[in-house]
Image: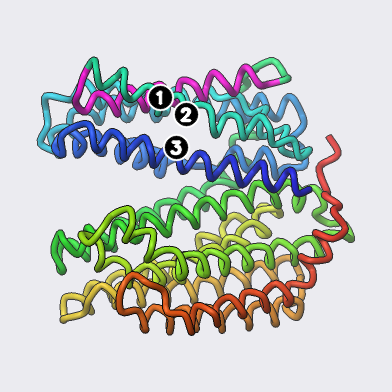
């Protein structure tokens, strides 16, 4: 069990660290203008992926028929069709995108980046099938090796091009290696099949995930737009840096927890062990979110001070508040993972509607004289409401009790409150010792409160699909 946890977490952490390192190295090597152009390539791919993300990989893990070779071939066929359509769409969009960003001379580069969704379309799904039986090694290798190779290619590419093409070809190399690794590590032959029934199932499973991705894309970029327009580019730089640091941590934790719990939950759905495992999944997300808040509160300020210096000193008071916001997202991820195990993919979308609905309020508030903290506090309010909705839907639709979560949720709420007090008491980059000690004590109480998670870890019994 602990080997699987370490493998998943280390894979996601290494992937995030390598991607960050690659982007920081390229940012240091090429001009600011060239890096700005290169950044739009990533944005272009993200927009197309957001518009068509159906969660077929998660469906491969969740579905009772996920081990069926015909079902796998049909999902791969649907993914290939989606990849070809996305590639064509992005290729045709290249000219308008280059014109929109004011760089018509790099239209060819936007056409080249259309190879990314095309390559994603032909990824072998066997690594997702193997994760159903808790074999996470192929997925971890695919997470780590391609970004490592992409990072190592930066210097040779810089010696050849020394401009935005460094990131362009580093991205293309990474996705080419992901495609290659997925086939090398597969155990089954690669087959494609177009099946209308499986496509219909995929659309039913995936349309809420696609809409949820669009909602979160709107939130993240909408908040940046509000800050940049109303508070200026300097405030936007501070907000973006603090937001990115905390979001990266939250994504690593959420993705790791989903990879670990989803195969087990879907494998035991409808059986006696499922309720206890669902409680362990809920509580595991609470522990991870609280751990992130504790870590950011105690280490975030010293880290930013040491790495970024005085230039980003004003971002330090934002870190703990943003960690609270992201912790609520991690908590909400527990609700989404449990719901997804039963194919209730619309739960996450419904939980995020409140956050999107509060964007106009944030804009009006800031336009009327509000500041960066007001934007974050409104976001926290939206995440809190979304957590309540996501938790209520998951418990109601799966007929699960609230009682095992009452104490963990209560202690976690107190911890987040003390974290807010900690942020308010900051005077420089050094953490406040009084509230910092209180956070450490409360985190120990959270660990005591998560009884179902402790029992699950003590028994070291991992459920799985019997493929």
The range drawn in magenta is 161-186
In the shown orientation, is residue 200 left or right of residue 219?
Answer: right
Residue 428 can be seen, yes or no: yes
Residue 218 highlighted magenta (yes or no): no
| Mark 1, residue position | 152
Mark 2: few/some/many CA within 10 Å (<14, 14-19, 20+):
some
Quadrant assignment, res 98: top left
Given residues 359 and 419, the one toward you in this image is: 419
CB atoms of marks 1 and 2 within 8 Å: yes
CB atoms of marks 3 and 2 within 8 Å: yes
The image position of residue 164, as x and y in percent, is 21, 28
Given residues 162 and 281, the one toward you in this image is: 162
Which label sits on residue 407?
A: none
CB atoms of marks 1 and 3 within 8 Å: no
N-terminal label among 3 and 2: 3
Instruction: Check disc 1 and report its element: helix, strand or loop.
Output: helix
| Mark 3, residue position | 18
Q: Main secondary structure of the magenta part?
A: helix
Which label sits on residue 148?
A: 2
Instruction: Check disc 2 and report its element: helix, strand or loop.
Output: helix
The image position of residue 161, as x and y in percent, is 21, 18
Between the C-alphas of marks 1 and 3, the distance is 10 Å
Establish if 205 lies above or below 311. above
Residue 328 can be seen, yes or no: no
Identified at 71% across, 33% down, the residue is 129
Identified at 24% across, 17% down, the residue is 159
């Amino acid at each position: 069990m602990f080997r699987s946890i370490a493998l998943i977490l280390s894979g996601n952490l290494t992937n995030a660290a390598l991607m960050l390192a690659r982007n920081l190295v390229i940012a240091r090597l090429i001009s600011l203008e060239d890096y700005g152009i290169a950044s739009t390539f990533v944005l272009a791919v993200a927009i197309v992926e957001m518009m068509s993300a159906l969660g077929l990989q998660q469906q491969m893990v969740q579905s009772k028929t996920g081990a069926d070779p015909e079902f796998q071939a049909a999902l791969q066929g649907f993914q290939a069709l989606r990849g070809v359509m996305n590639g064509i769409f992005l290729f045709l969009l290249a000219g308008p995108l280059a014109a929109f960003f004011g760089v018509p001379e790099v239209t060819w580069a936007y056409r080249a980046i259309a190879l990314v969704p095309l390559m994603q379309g032909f990824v072998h799904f066997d690594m997702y099938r193997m994760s159903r039986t808790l074999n996470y090694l192929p997925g971890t290798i695919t997470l780590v090796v391609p970004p490592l190779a992409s990072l190592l290619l930066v210097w040779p590419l810089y010696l050849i091009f020394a401009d935005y093409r460094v990131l362009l070809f580093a991205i293309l190399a990474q996705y080419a290696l992901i495609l290659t690794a997925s086939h090398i590590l597969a155990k089954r032959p690669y087959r494609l099949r177009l099946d209308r029934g499986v496509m219909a199932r995929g659309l039913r499973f995936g349309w809420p995930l696609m809409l949820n991705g669009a909602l979160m894309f709107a939130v993240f970029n909408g908040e940046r737009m509000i800050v940049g327009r109303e508070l200026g580019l300097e405030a936007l730089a501070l907000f973006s840096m603090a937001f990115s640091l905390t979001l990266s941590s939250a994504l690593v934790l959420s993705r790791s927890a989903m990879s670990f719990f989803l195969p087990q939950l879907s494998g035991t759905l409808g059986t006696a062990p499922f309720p206890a495992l669902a409680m362990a999944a809920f509580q595991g997300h609470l522990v991870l979110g609280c751990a992130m808040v504790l870590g950011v509160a105690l280490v975030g300020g010293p880290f930013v001070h040491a790495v970024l210096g005085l230039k980003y000193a004003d971002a330090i008071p934002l870190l703990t508040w943003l960690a609270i916001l992201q912790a609520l997202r991690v908590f909400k991820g527990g609700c989404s993972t449990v719901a997804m195990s039963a194919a209730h993919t619309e739960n996450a979308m419904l939980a995020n509607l409140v956050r999107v609905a509060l964007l106009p309020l944030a804009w009006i508030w800031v336009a009327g004289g509000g500041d960066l903290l007001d934007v974050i506090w409104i976001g926290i309010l939206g995440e809190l409401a979304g957590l309540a909705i996501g938790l209520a839907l998951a418990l109601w639709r799966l007929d699960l009790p609230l009682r095992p979560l009452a104490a963990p949720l209560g202690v976690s709420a107190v911890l987040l409150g003390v974290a807010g007090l900690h942020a308010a008491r900051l005077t420089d980059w050094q953490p406040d010792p009084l509230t910092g000690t209180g956070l450490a004590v409360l985190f120990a109480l959270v660990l005591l409160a998560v009884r179902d998670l402790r029992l699950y870890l003590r028994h070291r019994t991992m459920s799985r699909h019997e493929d």
